[in-house]
Image (spheres, grey):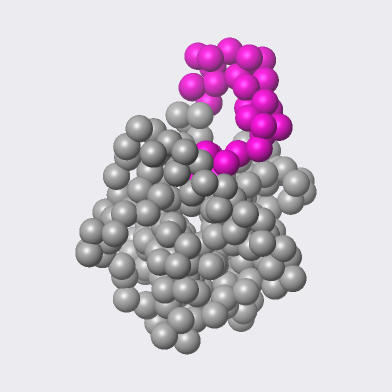
C-alpha cells in the first residue's frame, strides 16, 4: 500500500540506560529522562501495589516470562508496522502474526505519514521519548501509538498510564516541531489482540488537555524527587 508521506526531519539522538532508568541524548549532549522513566518514578502507590499483587499471584518466574514475551511481541509488531508504513516489504515473524492481522485494518485508515519511530525532546520541561507515529487517522492529524495485549482492555481505565504517555509525546512533538506547522491535539491508541479486531481508542482535545495537566504534575514530581536524590 502506498501512503502519502511528508516526513519531518528526524532528531539525531541515542538511548542509554543508567541505574534502571532510560534517557535520550541529543546531538548537543542534552540528556533527558524518558517519558516512561518519569512515569515509573512517579507511579502512584495503588499502581505499584497492583503490580506487586499480580507478581505475587502468578509467581516471580511466571511474571518474568509473561513480561519478556510481551516485550518481544511488542517489539516485533512495532517493527512490522514501521516497515509497512514506510513502504517496505513486511516479513512478519510467526509469533507476531496474530497481532499484525489484528491491527492491519486500522492501518488502512492511516495516511499522511510525518514520522515513524522517532525520538522527541521537550526542551522546556526536560523530558524525551520515542513516538510510534505521527500521521493522520481518518483525515485528522494525530499521534499514533501501537500496543499489544492478549485480551481486550475494554475501557480507557484499563489502559492505565498509556494515555499520559501519549499526551506527553504530543507535548514534546508540538514543542519541538512547532516551526513545521505541527500542532497536534488528537491521539490514537490501538491495541492489537490475537484473533480479534484491534481495539481503537481515540482521544479528543478536551481529554488530552486534562491528561496534560496531570502529566505536568508528574514531571514536576520527578524533578522534585531528583533534587532529593542529588
Q: Which residues are magenta?
A: 38-66
Q: Residue at x 67, y 26 (%)?
A: 49
Q: Is residue 151 left or right of residue 226?
A: right
Instruction: Name the spot of residue 35 as percent of width and height, x first.
Output: 48, 51
From where the camera sits, is residue 105 visible? no
From where the camera sits, is residue 17 visible? yes
Instruction: Name the spot of residue 162 as percent of width and height, x first.
Output: 61, 50
* Image quadrant containing the C terminus: top left
Q: How many marks?
A: 0
Q: Is residue 50 magenta?
A: yes
- Tell me: residue 204, above or below residue 126: below
Q: Residue at x 42, y 73 (%)?
A: 176
Instruction: Name the spot of residue 224 as percent of width and height, x first.
Output: 52, 46
Q: Is residue 36 left or right of residue 139?
A: left
Q: Residue at x 29, y 59 (%)?
A: 30
Q: Quadrant of residue 83?
A: bottom left
Instruction: Name the spot of residue 166 as percent of width and height, x first.
Output: 57, 59
Q: Main secondary structure of the magenta part?
A: helix
- Tell me: residue 185, above or below residue 37: below
Q: Quadrant of residue 189?
A: bottom right
Q: Is residue 136 magenta?
A: no
- Tell me: residue 53, above or below residue 179: above
Q: Quadrant of residue 193?
A: top right
- Tell me: residue 195, above or below residue 126: above
Q: Is residue 7 left or right of residue 112?
A: left
For the residue pair 74 and 127, the one nearer the viewer reads as 127
Amino acid at each position: 500500500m502506498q501512503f502519502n508521506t511528508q516526513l519531518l526531519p528526524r532528531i539525531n539522538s541515542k538511548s542509554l540506560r543508567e541505574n534502571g532508568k532510560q534517557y535520550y541524548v541529543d546531538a548537543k549532549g542534552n540528556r533527558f529522562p524518558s517519558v516512561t522513566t518519569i512515569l515509573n518514578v512517579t507511579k502512584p502507590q495503588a499502581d505499584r501495589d497492583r503490580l506487586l499483587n499480580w507478581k505475587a499471584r502468578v509467581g516471580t518466574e511466571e511474571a518474568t516470562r509473561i513480561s519478556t514475551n510481551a516485550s518481544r511481541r511488542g517489539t516485533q509488531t512495532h517493527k512490522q508496522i514501521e516497515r509497512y508504513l514506510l513502504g517496505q516489504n513486511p516479513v512478519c515473524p510467526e509469533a507476531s502474526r496474530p497481532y499484525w492481522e489484528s491491527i492491519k485494518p486500522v492501518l488502512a485508515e492511516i495516511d499522511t505519514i510525518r514520522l515513524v519511530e522517532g525520538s522527541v525532546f521537550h526542551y522546556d520541561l526536560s523530558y524525551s521519548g520515542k513516538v510510534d507515529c505521527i500521521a493522520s487517522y481518518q483525515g485528522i492529524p494525530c499521534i499514533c501509538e501501537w500496543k499489544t495485549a492478549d485480551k481486550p482492555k475494554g475501557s480507557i481505565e484499563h489502559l492505565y498510564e498509556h494515555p499520559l504517555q501519549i499526551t506527553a509525546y504530543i507535548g514534546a512533538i508540538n514543542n519541538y516541531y512547532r516551526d513545521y506547522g505541527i500542532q497536534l491535539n488528537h491521539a490514537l491508541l490501538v491495541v492489537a489482540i490475537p484473533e480479534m479486531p484491534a481495539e481503537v481508542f481515540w482521544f479528543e482535545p478536551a481529554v488530552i488537555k486534562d491528561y496534560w495537566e496531570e502529566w505536568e504534575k508528574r514531571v514536576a514530581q520527578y524533578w522534585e524527587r531528583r533534587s532529593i536524590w542529588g
